[in-house]
Image: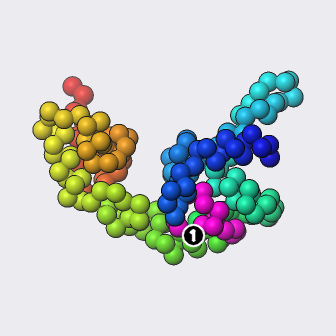
Amino acid sequence: MKASDIERFWRKVDKSGDCWIWLAGKDRKGYGKFSLGGKYDENGNRRNTMVSAHRFSYELAHGTIPEHDSFHGMCVLHRCDNPGCVNPDHLFLGTNEDNVHDMLTKGRNATNPNLGSAHAMAILNESQVRELHSRYQSGGITQAALATEYGVSLSTINHIMTGRLWSHLGLARKKAKAP
């Protein structure tokens, strides 16, 4: 690892709390993504190499992640259950089986999810979601304004309106039928 990559990595981390939060790009599940640019293919063309921020942090603190026979190799799991956390003290190694067991133990399995405010990562509660949905449907307020007011992202508000999030409340807009 180059010193410049390490310095750039830590500039993208908020260490003000117990969890050290990745501030740059994240995937759809909230895991940080870090570009180790400067890699070149066989033709000399630059290509980005994206790595998981928590795995990079683990390797900085504990060394190379060992190889493993499973499909994903060794996993880096979070004690804090916060996918955006890169605090190496919150990270530990496990097999894919360990990762699945950790998910089930913490109630994050998709076949039996903790819905709504029972979900460990919920920011909103059912009452707030119903309220913001009603306010948007009534008009006079934008999704962006609701996102700011409720302290969530614009995509969260959009996903509520389209039924991708909080769908168990049955609030999504009905699409008009084509003539």
Split into 4 quadrants, where in the image is the C terminus?
top left
Q: Using the image as rendered, state which of residue 155 and residue 37 is in the foreground.
A: 37
- Residue 72 to residue 151: above or below: below
Q: What x and y, as percent, mark residue 56?
A: 70, 52
Instruction: Please report the residue visible at 68 percent of the width from the left and 55 percent of the height from the top.
Output: 57
- Residue 148 to residue 110: above or below: above
Q: What x and y, as percent, mark residue 108?
A: 47, 66
Render colour scheme: rainbow
Instruction: Please report the residue visible at 68 percent of the width from the left and 62 percent of the height from the top.
Output: 75
The answer to which quarter of the image holds residue 96 is: bottom right
Q: What x and y, as percent, mark residue 1?
A: 80, 46
> So how many labels did they put on this image?
1
- Residue 125 to residue 1: above or below: below
Q: Which residue is label 1 attached to?
A: 79
**Residues in magenta, as a range:** 79-96
Q: Using the image as rendered, state which of residue 15 and residue 74 is in the foreground.
A: 15
Residue 58 lies left or right of residue 138; in this view the side is right
Observer able to see residue 78: yes
Residue 134 lies left or right of residue 155; in this view the side is left
Q: What x and y, as percent, mark residue 17?
A: 49, 60
Instruction: Please report the residue visible at 55 percent of the width from the left and 42 percent of the height from the top.
Output: 24
Observer able to see residue 161: no
Q: Is residue 172 magenta?
A: no
Q: Is residue 87 magenta?
A: yes
Q: Which residue appears farthest toward the bottom when viewing the image?
A: 105
The answer to which quarter of the image holds residue 116 is: bottom left
Q: Which residue appears farthest toward the left when viewing the image?
A: 138
Q: Which residue appears farthest toward the right when viewing the image?
A: 42
Residue 103 lies left or right of residue 147; in this view the side is right
